[in-house]
C-alpha cells in the first residue's frame, strides 16, 4: 500500500487535479474527494485569514498512519492526503483528501474517517484572524 499513498504538507497552493491524477486507478468504481477551504466566518465573526502551523515530520507520519489504517478497514486502492501550512486567504484550500476504492460507499467511509482522524490526531494548528484580534483554534481544519 505504501506506493499507493501520497502524503504532502505544503506552503504552496494545493491542487485537486494532482490528487485526482494520483488516485486514479483502473479498478476504482468510486473516487471521493474532501476539499476543506477557508471560510469567511466562524461563530458569527468575520474571519480575515487563517494561519496553519505543523510539526511537519510528525504530521506526515500521522497522516500516513491514517491512510494505512483506512486501507486496513476499507479496500482503499489509492489515497492522497495533502495539507497547507502558512497564511491562507478566504476561499483557499487548506486540506484535500482523495480516496479511490472499488465501490463508492467504501470510498466515502474511508474519506470521512481520514478527515475526522486528521482533525483529532495530526499536529497541525490553526490560527484565525478577525478584525479585533486572533485566536488559536483547538480543532484542526
Image (cartoon, helix red, strand yellow):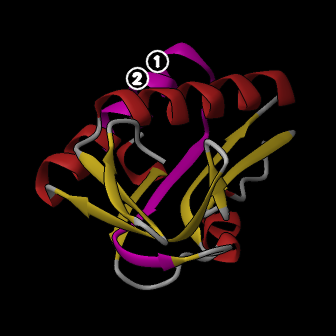
Which image quadrant for residue 15? Answer: bottom right
Residue 59, percent across and down?
23, 49
What secondary structure is found at the residue carrying circle 2? Answer: helix
Q: Compared to 136, does 87 lie above or below?
A: below
Residue at the extreme front: 132
Which image quadrant for residue 41? Answer: bottom right
Residue drawn where x is 52% and y is 54% of the image: 80
Q: Compared to 51, does 58 lie above or below?
A: above
Residue at the extreme top: 73
In the image, taking residue 36 as reference, residue 123 lies left or right, namely left
Where, quadrant-wise, is the N terminus in this rendering? top left
Q: Is residue 80 magenta?
A: yes
Q: Which residues are magenta?
A: 64-88
Residue drawn where x is 67% and y is 56% of the image: 35
Alpha carbon separation for disc pair 2 and 1: 5 Å
Q: Compared to 57, does 104 lie above or below?
A: above
What secondary structure is found at the residue carrying circle 1? Answer: helix
Residue drawn where x is 21% and y is 58% of the image: 54
In the image, taking residue 40 as reference, residue 54 lies left or right, namely left
Residue 129, percent across and down?
42, 67
Kindly indicate whether the residue at mark 1 contacts the one at mark 2 (C-beta within 8 angstroms). yes
Residue drawn where x is 34% and y is 62% of the image: 134
**Which-is-in-front pick, marks 2 and 1?**
2
Residue 37, percent across and down?
64, 62
Residue 56, percent across and down?
17, 59
How many neighbours does mark 1 have within 10 angstroms: few (below 14), some (14-19), or many (20 or more)? Answer: few
Label ID, residue 72? 1
Residue at which label 2 appears: 69
Amino acid at each position: 500500500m505504501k506506493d499507493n499513498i501520497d502524503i504532502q504538507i505544503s506552503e504552496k497552493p494545493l491542487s485537486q487535479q494532482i490528487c485526482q491524477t494520483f488516485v486514479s486507478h483502473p479498478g476504482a468504481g468510486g473516487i471521493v474527494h474532501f476539499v476543506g477551504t477557508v471560510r469567511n466566518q466562524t461563530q458569527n465573526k468575520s474571519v480575515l485569514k487563517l494561519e496553519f502551523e505543523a510539526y511537519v515530520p510528525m504530521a506526515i507520519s500521522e497522516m500516513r498512519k491514517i491512510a494505512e489504517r483506512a486501507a486496513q478497514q476499507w479496500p482503499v486502492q489509492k489515497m492522497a492526503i495533502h495539507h497547507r501550512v502558512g497564511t491562507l486567504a478566504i476561499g483557499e484550500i487548506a486540506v484535500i483528501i482523495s480516496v479511490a476504492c472499488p465501490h463508492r460507499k467504501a470510498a466515502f467511509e474511508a474519506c470521512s474517517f481520514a478527515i475526522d482522524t486528521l482533525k483529532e490526531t495530526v499536529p497541525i494548528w490553526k490560527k484565525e484572524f478577525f478584525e479585533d484580534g486572533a485566536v488559536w483554534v483547538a480543532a484542526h481544519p
